[in-house]
Image (cartoon, rainbow, N blue to C red):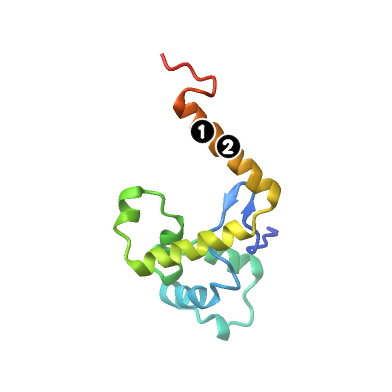
Amino acid sequence: MLNVDFRTEKISNVEYWYDIEEDWSLIEASFLMQYGIRLRAVNDMSYDEFCSYLSGIMPDTPLGNVVRIRSETDKELLESFTPEQRKIRSDWLGRQASEKSDEDTQEYLKNILKAFKDLAGEGGVDNG
């Protein structure tokens, strides 16, 4: 039996781009759209079955669309985002950043500083 808490950010180095509580209405709409399942009417779905269905949500569903926006990294696509899409993405990233521990934040900043030093040729990288 798979034990997964979807409220955690990472499980086995897998990053989740949704929150089971915050995105419940999107999950309900996506289950109905993709599977024809009205979650409020289901009394006998096991947790494992629910997790399997949730992991199979396609990009053309309400949750899939929001996940696509939140997880986008392509700069050209990001520049073409509408103001609403930008808000969806920035709200998500802001929530995720506020949930990071100080240790995680310091490690992240250290890695960014190292990347900038490497790019500038100051991090011990041989430029040539």
> Which residue is depicted at the point 47% across and 22% down?
121
Q: Is residue 56 left or right of residue 60?
A: right
Residue 22 placement (x, y as % from top left)? 57, 73
Rendered view: 71 above or below 104: below
Question: Which quadrant: the N terminus?
Answer: bottom right
Crowding at dot 2, Cα within 10 Å, few <14 / some 14-19 / many 20+, comes out as: few
Residue at far top of view: 128
Q: In this view, does 113 lie to the left or right of 78?
A: right
Q: Which residue is at 61% across, 38% downward?
A: 110
Q: Mark 2 points at which residue?
A: 111
Front one among 43 and 93: 93
**Residue at image x 68%, y 58%?**
2
SS at mark 2 in the image: helix
Gap between marks 2 and 1 measured at Cα: 6 Å
Percent position of residue 86, x then y: 39, 63
Front residue of 97/18: it is 97
Residue that badge 1 annotates: 115
Q: Which amino acid does label 2 sit on?
A: Asn
Three-letter residue code for mark 1? Ala
Question: Contact, CB < 8 Å: mark 2 with mark 1?
Answer: yes
